[in-house]
Image: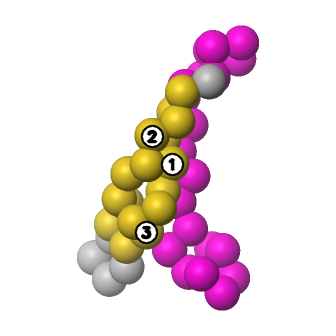
Amino acid sequence: MSRHTVTVKTDTEADEDAVIGYDPPLRTFFVQAFPNEETDE
């Protein structure tokens, strides 16, 4: 599985520790971003 840290931004918020990657066994790409540190939304 590959994982790379990226910054995901909206008009009002940003997550500097978002992760994007590829999972070879599942043959899928994924992204995980949580702009709200308190609620993980």
Discs 3/2, front: 2
Find out whether the residues at labels 3 and 2 contact each other: C-beta distance under 8 Å. Answer: no
Residue 1 as seen in the image, left or right of residue 26 = left
Name the element at disc 2: strand
Q: Is residue 31 magenta?
A: yes
Name the element at disc 3: strand
Residue 8 as seen in the image, left or right of residue 23 = left
Q: Which residue is mark 3?
A: 15
Residue 1 as seen in the image, left or right of residue 9 = right
Q: Residues within 10 Å of mark 2 (few under 14, many from 20)?
A: few
Residues rendered magenta in the picture: 22-41
Find out whether the residues at labels 1 and 2 contact each other: C-beta distance under 8 Å. Answer: yes
Alpha carbon separation for disc pair 1 and 2: 6 Å
Please name the amino acid that badge 1 sits on.
Val
**Which callout, 1 or 2, points at the residue further toward the start of the chain?**
2
As drawn, 24 above or below 20 = above
As drawn, 36 above or below 22 = below
| Residue 28 x %, y % | 60, 23
| Residue 11 x %, y % | 28, 76
Q: Is residue 35 magenta?
A: yes
Alpha carbon separation for disc pair 1 and 3: 10 Å
| Marker disc for residue 9 | none
Alpha carbon separation for disc pair 3 and 2: 14 Å
As drawn, 32 above or below 34 = above
As drawn, 28 above or below 40 = above
Q: Which residue is mark 1?
A: 19
Quadrant for the N terminus, please: top right
Name the element at disc 1: strand
Residue at image point 47% right, 61% down: 17
Q: Which residue is mark 2?
A: 4
